[in-house]
Amino acid sequence: MSETFKPVIGVVWSDGGMSKPDLDTATQFIAANARVLDRRRFERLLRGGDAGPVRDAVAAYRNADGGFGQGLEPDCRAPGTQPGVIELALRILDEADAWDESLVTGACDWLQANAPDGGGSVFVEPSVEGWPHAPWWVPQPDRANSLISTGRIAGTLLARGFEHPWLDRATELMWSQIESLSGEPGPYDMYGVAKFLNHAPDRDRAERALRAVAPLLLKVVALDPDEPGETHSPLGYAPRPDSLARSLFSDAVIEAHLDHLAAGQRDDGGWMFNWLSWSPAAELEWRGFITVESLVTLRDNGRL
């Protein structure tokens, strides 16, 4: 669960008062606790390592059907392929510039073969049942399209200029759903919306769509970094200075969240997430993943 983060041992304070994380302590945390996948991400993204080991680490979670499972996404311990696990696999390949056409094509072929009516992807497939998983990994009886899975997968593929029939249909679906979005979409839905719009080729249309959905997105964002509970930071929707959604937040809000993120490094060198920890193994795996992600976000914003 969440906690109030404070400056801790391992955070270096600059003359200007900004905090910077202790990379050496983070290195020790990764070495002591992270799985091979996140050790390789750390080496690649923060130590100038090669892309090949990241590709190989991701490939270890690939299933014979072309998709990904096997616990790559820490909250889903089921071996079978899941769209949410494919999303994370593609995201990692993209961020590390370890893109592999054969792995990506196989995953997209699986998505095409298992798409719900109308295209896109569901959030959870029934194959999760009977296996350990977080309580929110629940299949929907109507196999509804998931904004978070579809939007994030499509966003990554669009960022790479990848072409596949699944993406063509998913792109049409995302535009339709975004342009008719109303009510109270959840914070995770908005992650999919933001990722898709950030990489949609039609930039004018994306900017118009962002302006239209901005009130819905701002409803689910915690502008105060000290707000307790399972909150969603502006940095989640706009992690980089060039992120499309960055325009929705003032510089002061972004700087406050960067301060908060930097100060969140714990005594052991790692970061902690603010959602429910349902399994000791999943908690440790998420901490390794989030530690790398936190460092990359701080680096991309001039804090490392």
Image (cartoon, helix red, strand yellow):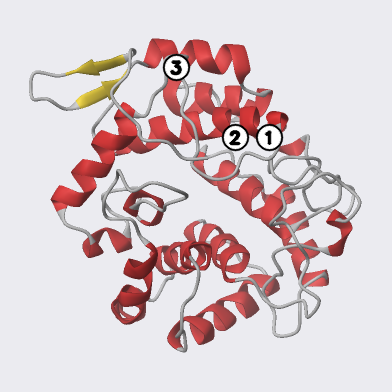
Residue drawn at x 62%, y 48% is: 88
Crowdedness near tag 2: few (<14), some (14–19) or many (≥20) residues, C-alpha within 10 Å: many
According to the image, label 3 marks what residue? 269
Towards the viewer: 259 or 239: 259
Q: Callout 2, which amino acid?
A: Trp
Crowdedness near tag 1: few (<14), some (14–19) or many (≥20) residues, C-alpha within 10 Å: some
Q: Secondary structure at mark 3?
A: loop
According to the image, label 1 marks what residue? 282
Q: How far is disc 1 from disc 2 in space, using C-alphas?
A: 6 Å
According to the image, label 2 marks what residue? 286
Q: Does 298 sit above or below residue 81?
A: above
Question: CB of mark 2 within 8 Å of CB of mark 3?
Answer: no
Question: CB of mark 1 within 8 Å of CB of mark 2?
Answer: yes
Q: Residue 236: where, in percent of width, then height? A: 40, 51
Image quadrant occupied by the C terminus? top left
The answer to whether residue 210 of the structure is visible from this angle is: no
Q: Callout 1, which amino acid?
A: Ala
Residue drawn at x 38%, y 46% is: 228
